[in-house]
Amino acid sequence: MSQLSEVTSVLDELQKLIYSAFERVGCSRKVLEDMLGLNVPINTNNMIVYLGIIEQRANELLNILHYVNLKVSRSLSLSLSLSLSTTITIIVIAIIGLICWACDSHVCVCGKTVDTRGLHGLACSVTAR
């Protein structure tokens, strides 16, 4: 096998893995279409764009996880006497509320509009406390 065919094979496999990660973490196709145009498949020229979008989505998911953990820990510390089923119900409601909240644009308590990506919270001096 020549070096060119080896490199091509590795790049093809890498592209499949990147696209799989793109789909699995729920990256926005709209963001991709805004950057590359409609129905542009992954290739060696745009792999870095896909990786950037994956990184952005991973950061969003980590922020959501942090928020949920914060809410859950506050709920648990305030209500240690709750039954396990009540505590689980509170956690599920918090997660569902967070998912719905993170998907809709809204106005932050600081007065600025938050888009559907929900990234405003990373820089907001009011909610970042």
Image: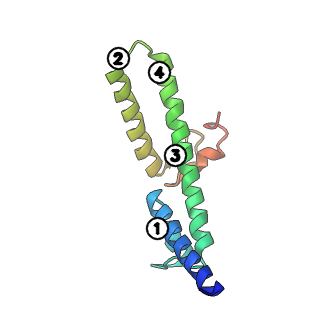
Could you tell me the amino acid type at mark 3?
Answer: Val
Residue drawn 35% across the image and 17% down it: 83
Q: CA distance from mark 2 to mark 1?
A: 42 Å
**Residue 49 found in image quarter:** bottom right
One can see residue 50 in this view: yes
Residue named by callout 4: 76
Under circle 4, the secondary element is helix
Taking the view exactly as shown, the residue that stands out farthest to the top is 81
Q: CA distance from mark 2 to mark 3?
A: 35 Å
Looking at the image, residue 127 sits to the left or right of residue 41; the answer is: right
Give the mark, 4 or 2, whose residue is nearer the N terminus: 4
Residue 83, label in figure: 2
Could you tell me the amino acid type at mark 1?
Answer: Arg
Give the percent coordinates (x, y) of residue 53: 57, 63
> Mark 1, mark 3: which one is toward the viewer?
1
Q: CA distance from mark 4 to mark 1?
A: 37 Å
Residue named by callout 1: 29
Give the mark, 1 or 3, whose residue is nearer the N terminus: 1
* Label 2: few (<14), some (14–19) or many (≥20) C-alpha neighbours in 10 Å: few
One can see residue 104 in this view: no
Residue named by callout 3: 107
* Label 4: few (<14), some (14–19) or many (≥20) C-alpha neighbours in 10 Å: some
Q: CA distance from mark 4 to mark 3?
A: 28 Å
